[in-house]
Image (cartoon, rainbow, N blue to C red):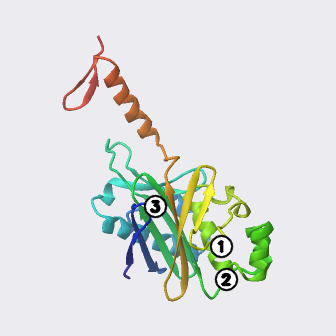
Amino acid sequence: MTATFRWLELENGPRCLLATCPITKHLPEELEFIDWDEIKTFKTAKRQNEHFSARWLLEEAVKEWGGIDCSRISVHRTVERAPYLQAIQGLWIQPTLPSISIAHSQALACVALIDHGWTVGVDAEPFARPPSSSVYDMMAKGKELALLQSGKLDALQAWTSKEAVQKAARMGMHLNPRDLVLSSNHLQNKITIENSIFQLENLSNDAYHITLAWAHDDHPIRTLEDDLLDATREAMRSGDDWEIGCATIRRNV
């Protein structure tokens, strides 16, 4: 199986990579980014194949990104289930890692990577399966709902746009799609949430509509190791009872 890579030139200049591949079978023991506890929760072979294909694709995308040793990082999730890359705990390294987003739909897996300091979300849906009109009132309200019902707003594009923004905001369904209002100006293609502006890029391949959402990362993910490293730096700056040798040590005097 091969992955397809597409480097994107985004407004404001962050480096961004979109990767896609077909969903197929993989052996989990051959994959780098596997969460064995998560695998145990899968009930069907279809769900396993989606997960394995997306994790294989993520590894290939990280290699394409360059400068990162996959054996030294792992994939974690926030409380809201947003995925992110992190250096393996105990290695005491802090590589500059891209933000990531993962999606799969029917037979396609997608992964997006964007420069550190930005956040990204990706969603894909097949052209052959647009949202049913019965879910329009779950997607939108007011004038936007009326535009969907009249056919003046493309339902498939609206669906993937809102899903991508939910992922980029790292809030998932905690962010109500009815509160995400697409601009009526098709040239803008932006959604504003509080002080964050999420820009949208609508893409496609032969069978799928793909939407990418990105914004400045105003709320970066922090880990316990980040806090420990920052506390160590602050202690080193604030006193003379630290010294640097083969390791950072504290004098007990």
Residue 41 position, x and y percent, is 59, 63
Label 2 sits on what residue type? Pro
Q: Disc 1 vs disc 2: Cβ atoms closer than 8 Å? A: yes
Can you identify the residue that label 1 sits on? Answer: 159
Q: SS of the residue at dot 3?
A: strand
Name the side, left or right, on which 144 lies relative to 64: right
Whole-number angstrom distance, CA of label 3 to CA of label 1: 20 Å
- Which residue shows up at 49% across the image and 80% down it? 23
The location of residue 42, given as percent across then percent down, is 59, 67
Look at label 1 and name its amino acid.
Answer: Trp
Depth check, front residue: 105 or 191: 191
Up/down of 11 relative to 208, above or below: above
**Amino acid residing under circle 3:** Ile
Q: Residue furthest left?
A: 245
Residue bearing mark 2:
130
Which residue is at a point 32% across and 17% down the rendered structure image? 239
Mark 2: which secondary structure?
loop
Residues packed near mark 1 inside 10 Å, few (<14), some (14 to 19) or many (20 plus): many
Q: Secondary structure at mark 1?
A: helix
The residue to which callout 3 is attached is 100
Q: Residue 237 in the image: x percent, y percent?
A: 32, 24
Residue count near mark 2 (Cα–Cα under 10 Å), binned few <14, some 14–19, many ≥20: some
The Cα–Cα distance between marks 1 and 2, rounded to whole angstroms, is 9 Å
Q: Earlier in the sequence, mark 2 or mark 3?
A: 3
* Tags 2 and 3 touching, CB below 8 Å: no
The one nearer the camera, 119 or 253, is 119
- Quarter of the image for the C terminus: give it: top left
The single residue placed furthest to the top in the displayed view is 253
